[in-house]
Amino acid sequence: MDWTLEVIVVPVSDLDRAKHFYSEQLGFKVDHDTTFNEDTRVLQLTPPGSGCSIVLGKGIVKGEPGTLKGVQLVVSDLEKARAQLIERGVEVGEIVRMNEADGGSFIFFDDPDGNSWAVQEIKARATGGEWK
């Protein structure tokens, strides 16, 4: 039996600000933005090339904004990914090379609420999910 990771819930304080950050600045595709009523709204976005999406919501998401830490994206070209994030106005740290082996290099950034993300370079395993 396959167990696939499909969705990560990201707690945010302002859905429109978060939608702008994840779609416009990170380049995630907006799969849907559905308002059920005044108290319930669900946004689902998917990183380019990913089989796993994120969900942002009002009335459905548990957890305090900014408490998600350590979710990791993988790219085949970390320098290119970092340059694209900077170009889109994302505050991103310098490349950290923990070792010279494939998979040993990272960059880190936070969303507007302080949810922390890592981007790892794995040239051998990347599946074309480049930052577009």
Image (tube, rainbow, N blue to C red):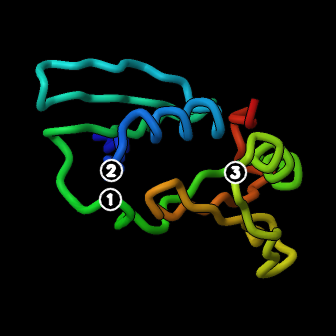
Q: Is residue 85 left or right of residue 6?
A: right
Asked which secondary structure carries label 3, the reply is loop
- Quickly name the residue at label 1: 65
- Quickly name the residue at label 3: 90
43 shown above or below 110: above
Q: Is residue 4 left or right of residue 83?
A: left
* The C terminus, quarter of image: top right
Contact check, label 3 and label 2, Cβ < 8 Å: no
Marks 3 and 1, the one that precedes in the sequence: 1
Q: Is residue 6 left or right of residue 127?
A: left
Q: Amino acid at mark 2?
A: Ser
- Label 3, label 1: how many angstroms apart (C-alpha)? 18 Å
> Which residue does the image show at 22% across and 19% down from the upper left?
35
Is residue 49 visible in the rendered image? The answer is: no
Nearer-the-camera pick, 17 or 100: 17
Contact check, label 3 and label 1, Cβ < 8 Å: no
- Residue 103 percent across, percent down from the top left: 73, 65
Q: Amino acid at mark 3?
A: Val
**Looking at the rendering, which quadrant does residue 7 occupy?**
top left
Asked which secondary structure carries label 1, the reply is loop
- Residue 8 percent across, percent down from the top left: 36, 47
Is residue 117 visible in the rendered image? The answer is: yes
Contact check, label 2 and label 1, Cβ < 8 Å: yes
> Which residue does the image show at 82% across and 72% down from the upper left?
101
- Quickly name the residue at label 2: 13
Q: How would you rate the neighbour count of disc 3 (Cα within 10 Å): few for under 14, some for 14-19, many for 20 or more? A: some
Asked which secondary structure carries label 2, the reply is loop
> Which residue does the image show at 74% across and 46% down from the upper left?
89
- Label 2, label 1: how many angstroms apart (C-alpha)? 6 Å
